[in-house]
Amino acid sequence: MTKRLFRFAAVLRIADSGRDWAAKARKLEDAGFDALLVPDHLVGPRFAPLAAMTAAACATTRLRVGTLVIANDYRHPAVLAKEAATIDVLSGGRLELGLGTGWMAADYRAGGLPFEPPGIRVDRLTEAIAVLKGLWADGPFSFAGAHYRIDALEQFPKPISPRLLLGGGGPRMLRLAAREADVINLGMRVRADGTGPDGNDGGLDAFLAKIDLVRRAAAHRYDQVELGTSVQQVGVRKAEEAWSAADSSRQNETPQVLLGTRDEITAKLRHWRDTHDLSYFVLHHERDLNAFIPIVEELAGT
């Protein structure tokens, strides 16, 4: 198997101005990060992802731009396919499109959107991925599913080199990611009612079981998939942010919590890459950026 090279991304949510946002993007690029990712929620202090991605792409030359993750329920996949392809072309092929079902009940409630059971949302996401890939391919595309219908639609421009990132913690989402994703972000399973992570899903054993599930489900394409996770604690443990749904309380033995010195953290990351194939690490909190930059500078691309 080809050695997996470290890649690093950071989630950025908001800035005081366009100039400040551009400066943040350039800071990531200069430090060796591979991607800037934007979340997708209707509530909370966050930019809308598609406009923010475009601005970040215009401010940089190498940095990939993407989402962690677009909520499929908020946009029809034919609309998203057009928007995403446009961003990929305008950025010169730097799109890292993270896609998920949509899960946070507060978004649905405040936005007046129907919040359906997880199984329906995963079914709809599965169809949406088929629509995205079909519309990004050559020729007219038709699709007839339970949730979407496409009638001989051919969209232009076609994307250059988009990468699909899927995140998840439940078995169905991980199997879908193993079949379809270029990058898989391993997380905790969320509660069916959309109120946050399922506390029963934390810990080292659960994390390792997800890696094993992906390995078996990906089968022959496993070597082409990048495995990663979101790093929620760096250096010393801090209280979770009030606006964040992250729960790192049971994740000390996983790569989501990287406590210790710079040397200790880099050793942990090498262990997770060399022993468990994780190579794509996403910094969850901007507050940890300055502490994480020296680690990125040492490990990126190695």
Image (cartoon, helix red, strand yellow):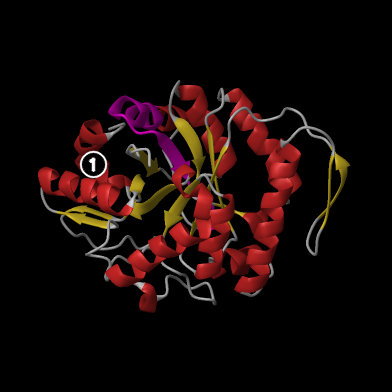
User: Quadrant location of residue 125?
Assistant: bottom right
Q: Is residue 115 something one can see in this rendering?
A: no
Q: Name the residue under label 1.
A: 292
Task: Assign the C terminus to one quadrant of the image.
Answer: top left
Q: Give the range drawn in magenta.
A: 23-43
Q: Is residue 228 something one can see in this rendering?
A: yes
Residue reaching furthest right? 151
Q: Is residue 252 left or right of residue 187?
A: left
Q: Which residue is drawn at 81% across and 60% down?
A: 145
Query: Whole-percent x and y of residue 110?
Result: 60, 66
Task: Assign the N terminus to one quadrant of the image.
Answer: top left
Secondary structure of the residue carrying tag 1 is helix
Observer-nearest of 15 and 226: 226
Observer-nearest of 43 and 165: 165
Q: Residue at x 42, y 36 (%)?
A: 35
Query: Whole-percent x and y of residue 297?
Result: 23, 31
User: Quadrant location of residue 250?
Assistant: bottom left
Observer-nearest of 91 and 153: 153
Query: Whole-percent x and y of residue 156?
Result: 76, 29
Query: Whole-percent x and y of residue 234?
Result: 22, 51
- The question of residue 136 being in magenta is answered with no
Amino acid carrying mark 1 in the image: Phe
